[in-house]
Image (tube, coloured by chain):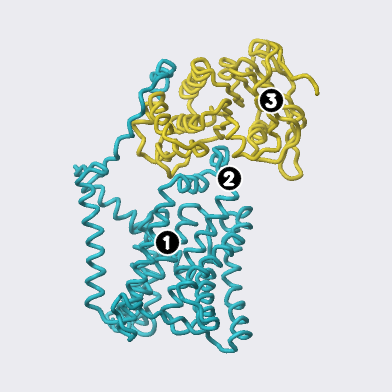
Amino acid sequence: MPFHIRESSPLHWVLRIISVSALAALAVYIASDSAPSTLGKITEACTLAIAAVSLNLLLGFNGQISLGHSTFVGLAAFTAGYSVNAWHWNPWVSLGVACLVCFVLGLILGLPALRLKGPYLALVTLAVAFVWPTVARKFLDQTVKASTLKGMRLRPPTWTGLSNNRTDRALFLFWLAIVLLVVTYVIVRNIRKSRIGRSLVAVRDNETAAAVMGVNLAITKTVTFGISAALAGVAGWLAAAQLATLDENSFTILSSIKYLLALFLGGAATLAGPVVGAFSYFFADDLLKTNATKWDFLPGPLSKGPVASFLLGVLVIVFVFIAPYGLVGFIKLQARRVAVVIPRPLRAAPLATESTEHISPAVAGEI
Amino acid sequence: MSPEPTNANGVAPLLDVRGLTAGYGQVQVLQGLNLRVAQGEVAVILGANGAGKTTTMRAISGMIARKGAITFSGDPMAKRSPDEIVRMGIAQVPQGRGTFTDLTVEDNLRAGAFVRKGADIEADIQEWFDVFPRLRERREQKAGSLSGGEQQMLAIARALMSRPKLLLCDEPSLGLAPIITQELFAVLQRLNAERGLSILIVEQNANLALGIAHSVFVLETGAIVASGTAEEISNNDAVRKAYLGY
């Protein structure tokens, strides 16, 4: 018999506070006791997580597939790298501009998405993801006349007390990545829990029903595309801050596939899913890349050569069978055996003055 | 100006559709359809598969391009968008299990109040939970886990959350067991009788539909071929043969 917890009861709040503090404590512990390279990896994982969270808003909650998110990430990274290096913009301003540029491109891409669904939308966004590296290459050839664009160097602001050496910059980027991830997560969470969020899911589940309820399909879908693209822009800006050089091959269709993988591994259409998925994917990949070459117990040809991607592929396939609803879905299912959260009762209605007009409940009661 | 169109009783109709044509792409489905729904009545459109029932519904709620004159409470609405039409007071229960399967029952109702704002939304949810107690029991469940009948009830309750003056029901009996369908029609009848809600139903289940209808329209290949009171239509030989089977 599972343990019952009332929603919003003191116990529920204590449990929530404990879990959030535990995560915060973990971040502090990692920050205090890690090499710059480890911090760099976590920053990279956060970038992946932000991209996955942005894709979740579009695909998970609104049901529109995009294989073109690598383009938004790349566009934001290039916008940031170029504006900071060539025009000497303030990097923080470039964050805003990069998101805005992505928002506009997202809106534009959202227009064909109004008429296209499923595989056809996937195809159009796939085309965008394919075109992007070529466009970026042309841009590099014609403007910087180099094979790469410099990333931007963020100096830790003085109030942080961090200096501008490698260790401190890594630490600063680590915290910045955490903050940006939290902000992105909170934005998506708040959208999902609002009236607009319900309309997003409504459009995904049943377009006709959503439309006859008064949801404007065209606006909902294009604006969601735009917001998702803008959030992907945050990931791109963070990538520009972390990478020394940007070239067109950093943001190909493979990155888009990675975002999709992270999203589905963690659990699409759940709030925590893309974050959990991104971290799991990133560190599983990292672990295999560092260690798999040393595993001489692997049979035959597997003990030689690059087996990491192969093993990761196998892991993903196995995982899809074990946890079809992603890690978060799997964990929720297991947790339900231990504890169940009882929803809070409906807010009390004002005294019904027209109660005599009520239809007798017995009519519908048996259905 | 031409005189206000009136029905037999001399009352301006709530919904007045004249010469409605609509279709998909090159295919014209509705060929100049005329119908009227008076304030406070249950009107039924009887039609076989492919007659244009769903298209009529979609044309009225603005989901597809249409031509013709449609007025609601005297206001022209043939050029309005679906969300404007909902705000005017027309709610539709779409065909099939038109619920949002991944939202909870309660959130489905909240979503139904999309065009409204304010605290009385919660009160309305309570009210519909009183009318449909089974929905209250399941309020935190995802709508997709409900039975077909429960989902149809939820779809009706959700449509009513926008506080419509006219409720459109697109084949409510589709895919439901006969006993459930009967109860569903009983609910619709009560909504009409006790709250004065005007209802337009498209159906091919003539027996049940005629049982609660005040006026009936028979739809064939995109046009109304017969109309009248439920009694008149029940006595019409052609209709009896085609829809009632005797």
Q: Where is residue A341 in the image (x, y as percent from the top left)?
A: 26, 44
Q: Mark 1 points at which residue?
A: A53
Say if A334 sits above or below B58 in the image: below
Q: Name the residue under label 2.
A: A216
Q: What element carries label 1?
A: helix
Say if B98 sits above or below A319 in the image: above
The amino acid sitting under disc 3 is Gly
Q: Are marks 1 and 2 in contact (CB under 8 Å)?
A: no
Q: What element carries label 3?
A: loop
Q: Name the residue under label 3.
A: B74
The chain letter under disc 3 is B
Q: Residue A331 or A141: which is nearer the viewer?
A: A141
What color was chain B assigned in the picture? yellow
Q: Position of residue B27 (x, y in %)?
A: 75, 41
The amino acid sitting under disc 1 is Val
Can residue A361 be seen here? The reply is: yes
- Give the residue drawn at x 38%, y 24%: B130
Can residue A366 be seen here? The reply is: no
Quadrant of residue B39 within the rendered picture = top right
Disc 3 versus disc 1: nearer the observer = 3
Say if B121 sits above or below B3 in the image: below
Quadrant of residue A328 within the rendered picture = bottom left
Say if A359 sits above or below A123 in the image: above
Disc 3 versus disc 2: nearer the observer = 3
Identify the residue at the far front of this view: A159
In the rendered structure, the answer to whether residue A57 lies left or right of residue B169 reads: left
In the rendered structure, the answer to whether residue A157 lies left or right of residue B32 reads: left
Q: Do the residues labelled 3 and 2 touch (CB within 8 Å)?
A: no
Q: What element carries label 2?
A: loop
